Amino acid sequence: MQKERKLIIAGNWKMNKTVAEALDLVHGLKRELAAIKEVDLVVCPPFTALCEVSRQILDSNIRLGAQNMSEQNGGAYTGEISAVMLKEFSVRYVILGHSERRQHQAETDALISRKALAVHAAALKPIVCIGETLQEREAGKTEEVVGRQLRGSLAGLNKEQMQETILAYEPVWAIGTGRNATPEQAQEVHAFIRRTLTELFDSSVAKRVRIQYGGSVKPSNARDLMSQPDVDGALVGGASLETRSFSDIIKNSI
Ligand code: 13P
């Protein structure tokens, strides 16, 4: 399908896959996806598998992402991982502000914006996640919540940095539930996000930023979601954990 922006489809493996399992998956993906040029392909394994996966995808069209990063450059921050450490493994993308981290690690928009600045300072690309809960949607607050998250999480970024930032709209009620947003619901919020980017930056930045949809993306719904004008890719959780389902999502999207 003809898209205004090149699709970017990323697999967020979350806290899954030992090194052996990760290598198994990546071997399968390399085999299945070798011919794909129309989509930017990204896998985001857990930190413990980055080194080995990085070696395996060196000669492929698959790029590496991390699931989080510290806003600090180094020092006494037990349990944290810095940009330099990620760059050692040729990581290109970093997921920031996933709703699971907002919920379980109490990450705030202010922290996410500091992390986004650190990701750009290291010449990596952030994938900044935003999205409303079911309660917020049912209260008619989707735009209010998503707008606030955008203003907070992107605070301090300049236009050049924004253009190199990827956004992921992930309605919390659609994550891991099997209940995806309909293509129309996704398009409505994606269009709102693009309008907000025009207000915060300008229309040329807004036109260039890629906005992924995430939340129960699977082979059967990928095509309809990706065919929406403002949906520029997907951030896939559960269905990215198997070669067949992740490759089918990609093949069905082009
Ligand atoms: P699922 O695809 O499992 O719903 O997860 C979506 C997600 O959280 C991707 O970051």
Image (cartoon, rainbow, N blue to C red):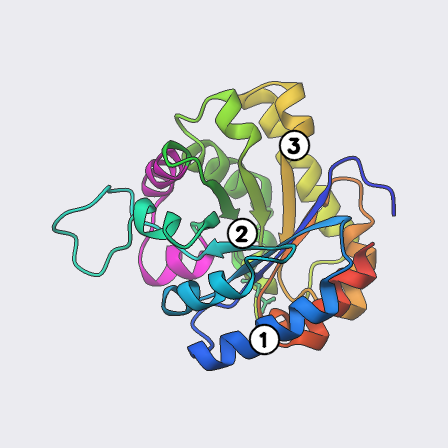
Residue 218 seen in the figure:
no
Front position among marks 3 and 1: 1
Q: Is residue 113 magenta?
A: yes
What's the residue at 45%, 50% (across, down)?
90
Please tell me which residue lies in front, 127 or 86: 86
Q: Earlier in the sequence, mark 3 or mark 1?
A: 1
The boundaries of the magenta stretch are: 98-119
Amino acid type, callout 2: Glu
Q: Mark 3: few, some, or many residues within 10 Å (few <14, many ≥20)?
A: many
Please provide percent x and percent y for residue 218. Answer: 72, 68
Question: Neighbour class for label 1 at 10 Å: few (<14), some, many (≥20)?
Answer: some
Who is closer to the viewer here, 24 or 206?
24
Q: Which residue is mark 1?
A: 25
- Tell me the distance, in whole angstroms, between the alpha carbons under discs 2 and 3: 16 Å
User: Which numbered dot is residue 194?
Assistant: 3
Above or below for 238 versus 64: below
**Residue under pointer 2:** 132
Give the main secondary structure of the magenta stretch.
Answer: helix
At horizontal 45% and vertical 33% (from top left) the residue drawn is 154
Above or below, 219 against 117 in this view is below
Residue 105 as seen in the image, left or right of residue 222:
left
> Label for residue 198?
none
Gap in angstroms between the C-alphas marked 3 and 1: 34 Å
Q: Secondary structure at mark 2?
A: loop
